[in-house]
Image (cartoon, grey):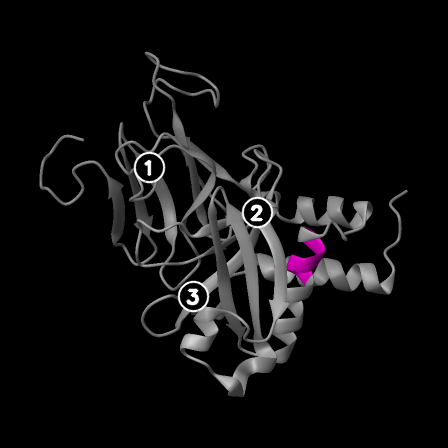
Amino acid sequence: MPKALSQSDNELRRMIQSCKKPADLLKFGHHGKPKWRKFFLTYSTVTRHWYLEWSSRDKTKDTKLNLQNVTQITLGQKTPKFERLSRRDVTDKSFSIWYEVGEKRDTLDLVAETESMFLQWTTSIRALVKNKVPPHVMELVKRDVSALDMSEPGMKSIGLMSSMVTKPQQQLKGKKKYEAALETTNVVYGFGLNTWGQLSGKNREEKAPLLLHMNTGENPTEIAGGWSHTIMLMSDGGVEAMGHRMGTGLEED
């Protein structure tokens, strides 16, 4: 029989669940003005790690942080990015996520819209980073975010490398397959081969699920692709595409 959740456990689960949904946070950077970005938490059943992801117009930038790389979380505005464009009026809703990736050390400096969002995000990330989520709660929140698992019901998955490649681990002539998945909430993820930018503009293999489209306005209703491109049919009848030769007018992929 499943263990009943205490009030505090249930509140922590609710907070983490809420952080799965894209939320507006004001992001401070090294240059320019602070910008509003959509942030959300994901759990990968492939790597078994938690990630913080966010939206960006610049497809060449990393927009995913493995929480395994987070070293600390500080409250207030105590970093060079905050000091460059200090906003003392929102200090009580400001926080910084410090992380290290290889030799790179940096911070994500964020401001929440409300005090409740500030508490939700800082509590959730701290609990995940410091392994303070009770095991029975962790199992529930992992299940809550298992939309990245292709075996979950409610997912539509399509192999995009070749119509002859149908099995998730199958290879064709030594080249790896890549996949995309359309969640029932119209959030699209992809992973695998990305040589031609078929999953993003980064031209690199994506070993963990990568956000291709989030639920913002017009949403994809179908996904399809060829050898090196991905196409999404949008709910307004438009089409979004990424990958090799997109926009060149050539008939072949």
Sort mark 1 into few (<14), some (14-19) or many (20+) by Cα contacts within 10 Å.
some
Query: Label 2: which residue?
Result: 69
Mark 1 vs mark 2: which is more N-terminal? 2
Q: CA distance from mark 1 to mark 2?
A: 34 Å
Mark 1 = which residue?
224
Three-letter code for the amino acid on which mark 3 is drawn: Arg
Q: Please give the residue where the numbered disc 3 appears in the rendered image.
A: 37
User: Element under label 3?
Assistant: strand
Q: Under tag 2, what secondary structure?
A: helix
Using the numbered discs, state the Cα–Cα distance from disc 3 to disc 1 in whole angstroms: 27 Å
Residues marked 3 and 2 touching at CB (< 8 Å):
no
77 in relation to 241, above or below:
below
Q: Nearer the viewer, residue 152 or 131?
A: 131
Q: Is residue 69 visible?
A: yes
Tell me if label 3 and label 1 are in contact, CB under 8 Å: no
In magenta, the rendered stretch is 124-128
Q: Residues within 10 Å of mark 2 (few under 14, many from 20)?
A: some
Residue 143 pos. (x, y %)? 68, 44
Residue 91 rendering spot, x and y as whole percentages = 56, 81
Quadrant in which the N terminus is drawn: top right
Q: Please name the amino acid that badge 1 sits on.
A: Ala
The answer to whether residue 23 shows anywhere in this view is no
